[in-house]
Image (spheres, rainbow, N blue to C red):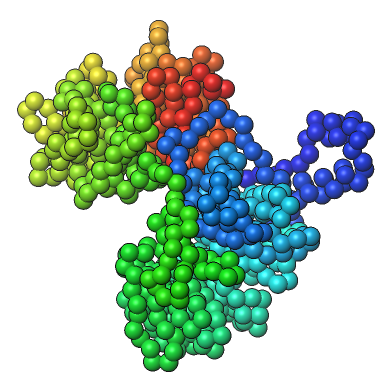
């Protein structure tokens, strides 16, 4: 879910022509490099440009890196994680650090490969990113970014350089692409829209793993589909490796060995095989939750050696040594067995449990509470940069965190209940967990808001109000615009609550629906409401900013009148509860378009992407004049006064 033609601007052209030291040859060479853009029939538009370093006032919050993939290139080790890329001359040396969103594009590196591309003078290290295309690292230190115009084309999952100089590019949704040094296109029409997960082989014998369609085998112009009817344990392919012994395909239900295009046997049946490596006549199988297995490939050999302590996610080789990424660390195999591994490079110190942020807020004591999509929550002390992590069956998928002004608690809306924390405790301790048996209309809680009549709780089944008289629920039968409520906003001095739903906005007073605002009776562009915030404007009527799924941000007055706003991305998706108002600005976090900023003094919008670790902005918070921006790839902050 993540565009652009790049040419030489008039200003740049005049500057180049006016510089006597630039020869005609240099000018022609620069134009050829910068304007690598294709839009002819059958080809996909892209740009190929030198990688630019972003100059910005954003700084990472509790920045650290746990490696997820790596490669050896030009005598150096390249280790990548959500926070960026570390380049080591040798283990133990100080690495060169390239930060995601600053030195690198705002997307994590997910895979590496080395190869000499067609037209290139030397071999390159090729890095695939989750949303920003390819990075090409040359031996002379120069780096280029190959960025397809279509967002689906630049969300890359696997890469395979071929001996011809062509590069096969597997994508998450757009299928299998081919880059020949000049053009980018589909490898074959039959490979369009295939969710690629793995690539192995060569021009004559190509194997493609997919997320849902098993493995595809392309040979001699023929395409064979290998699925569960062909002996594949599961249609989801995690990895593929090839040797003279056969082709080994990892799936969540074991590893299938294929010879001459036919399954010969299944190894480690029932194991969630995630990554594979071949070492002489043994197969190493890294699993999701059962450690590392080693299986002899001798005929009729079934025994496996297990190292349950190793959670390996990726293998790669230096030529002399087999290396692995495990728990964010770099390991080297000391002997050809599953137990002998040495830590070469430990992951950098980490204060946060995850990078996929779903909620941000500050407690009254100034601690930053950080919720994650699937890793519970952290409470970060910004002075010491230390975080305390909480995660259990209830505190897992966090949708929202708010400070309760009445109970003096920190309340976490989760997928499995409403968890109330003691805000005064030095450690985050749950005081109470509220679920359906306690009066909630649903265990899944999406938002919380407070008015003078009590607490309102949003769920996919309706609303629950906790007042002095106890819990009271209402849903569409009582007039709610839609049962699925995503977001809430309230007037603390009254009993007024706005509920953003899948079917529009419900305006309630004292837990009673007074008005519904929808596509049919207002200027709303979308009924799917994802975020609402109250924006106090001195001398003006009560104003609410409304975030929608696919309609950007709109403005609504106290009477329910909706007007469009001139946002930089009028059809963007605003993420759930990702709107924040300050006296100077209104901020909105989008799914693909970065951070949208409304300047209250000029009543104009601008958009910020530079300096963000991802264009998917998921959460916002403000404290002491600083804006904190949560994304799917970490958190950054900036002094509000330095914003453009």
- The correct choice, above or below, for 220 with respect to 98 in the image is below
The reply to whether residue 452 is visible in this rendering is yes
Left or right: where does residue 614 sit relative to residue 327? right
Q: Is residue 43 above or below residue 199?
A: above
Relative side of 464 to 612, left or right: left
Report whether residue 261 is seen.
no
Image quadrant where one finds the C terminus = top right
Position of residue 569 relative to residue 436, above or below, is above
Left or right: 322 as drawn, with respect to 544: right
Residue found 51% across the figure and 69% down from its top? 322
Q: Residue at x 70, y 50 (%)?
A: 141
Quadrant of the rendered image containing residue 180: bottom right
Q: Of 91 and 424, which appears nearest the observer?
A: 91
Q: Position of residue 361 (x, y in %)?
A: 33, 30
Identify which residue is drawn at 43% across, 81% down: 256
- Left/right placement of residue 530 relative to residue 153 reads left
């Amino acid at each position: 879910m993540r565009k652009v033609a790049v040419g030489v601007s008039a200003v740049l052209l005049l500057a180049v022509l006016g510089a006597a030291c630039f020869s005609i040859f240099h000018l022609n060479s620069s134009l050829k490099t910068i304007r690598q853009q294709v839009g002819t029939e059958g080809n996909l538009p892209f740009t190929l440009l030198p990688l630019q370093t972003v100059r910005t006032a954003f700084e990472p919050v509790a920045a650290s890196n746990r490696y997820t993939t790596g490669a050896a290139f030009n005598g150096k080790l390249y280790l990548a994680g959500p926070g960026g890329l570390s380049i080591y001359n040798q283990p133990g040396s100080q690495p060169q650090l390239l930060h995601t969103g600053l030195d690198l594009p705002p997307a994590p590196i997910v895979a590496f490969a080395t190869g000499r591309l067609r037209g290139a003078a030397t071999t390159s290290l090729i890095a695939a990113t989750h949303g920003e295309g390819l990075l090409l690292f040359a031996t002379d230190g120069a780096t280029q970014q190959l960025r397809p115009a279509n967002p689906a084309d630049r969300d890359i999952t696997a890469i395979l350089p071929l001996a011809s100089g062509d590069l096969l590019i597997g994508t998450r949704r757009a299928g299998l692409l081919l880059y020949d040094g000049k053009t980018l296109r589909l490898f074959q029409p039959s490979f369009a829209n295939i969710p690629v997960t793995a690539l192995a082989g060569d021009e004559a014998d190509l194997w493609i793993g997919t997320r849902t369609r098993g493995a595809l085998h392309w040979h001699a112009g023929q395409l064979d589909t290998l699925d569960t009817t062909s002996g594949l344990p599961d249609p989801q392919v995690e990895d593929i490796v090839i040797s003279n012994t056969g082709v080994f395909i990892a799936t969540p239900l074991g590893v299938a060995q294929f010879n001459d295009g036919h399954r010969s046997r299944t190894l480690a049946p029932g194991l969630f095989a995630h990554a594979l490596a071949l070492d002489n006549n043994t197969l190493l199988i890294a699993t999701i939750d059962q450690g590392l297995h080693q299986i002899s490939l001798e005929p009729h050999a079934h025994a496996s050696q297990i190292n349950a302590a190793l959670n390996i996610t990726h293998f790669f080789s230096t030529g002399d040594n087999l290396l692995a990424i495990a728990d964010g660390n770099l390991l080297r195999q000391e002997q050809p067995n599953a137990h002998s591994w040495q830590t070469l490079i430990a992951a950098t110190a980490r204060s946060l449990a995850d990078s996929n942020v779903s909620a941000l807020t500050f407690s009254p004591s100034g601690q930053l509470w950080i919720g994650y999509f699937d890793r519970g929550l952290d409470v970060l002390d910004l002075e010491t940069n230390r975080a305390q992590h909480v995660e259990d069956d209830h505190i897992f998928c966090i949708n929202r965190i708010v400070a309760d002004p009445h109970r003096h608690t920190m309340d976490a809306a989760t997928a499995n209940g409403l968890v109330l924390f003691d805000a005064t405790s030095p450690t985050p301790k749950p005081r109470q967990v509220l679920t359906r048996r306690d009066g909630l209309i649903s265990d899944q809680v999406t938002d919380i808001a407070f008015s003078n009549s009590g607490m309102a709780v949003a769920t996919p089944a309706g609303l629950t109000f906790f007042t002095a008289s106890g819990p009271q629920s209402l849903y569409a039968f009582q007039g709610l615009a839609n049962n699925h409520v995503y977001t809430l906003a309230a007037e603390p001095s009254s009993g007024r609550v706005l509920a953003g739903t899948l079917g529009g906005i419900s305006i309630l007073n004292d837990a009673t629906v007074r008005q519904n605002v929808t596509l049919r009776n207002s200027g709303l562009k979308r009924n799917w409401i994802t975020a609402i915030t109250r924006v106090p404007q001195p001398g003006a009527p009560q104003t609410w900013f409304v975030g929608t799924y696919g309609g950007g941000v709109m403005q609504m007055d106290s009477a329910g009148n909706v007007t469009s706003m001139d946002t930089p991305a009028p059809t963007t998706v605003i993420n759930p509860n990702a709107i924040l108002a300050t006296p100077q600005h209104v901020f909105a976090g989008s799914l693909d378009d970065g951070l949208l900023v409304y300047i209250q003094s000029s009543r104009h919008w601008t958009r910020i992407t530079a300096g963000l670790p991802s264009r998917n902005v998921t959460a916002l918070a403000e404290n002491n004049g600083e804006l904190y921006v949560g994304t799917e790839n970490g958190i950054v902050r900036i002094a509000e006064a330095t914003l453009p």
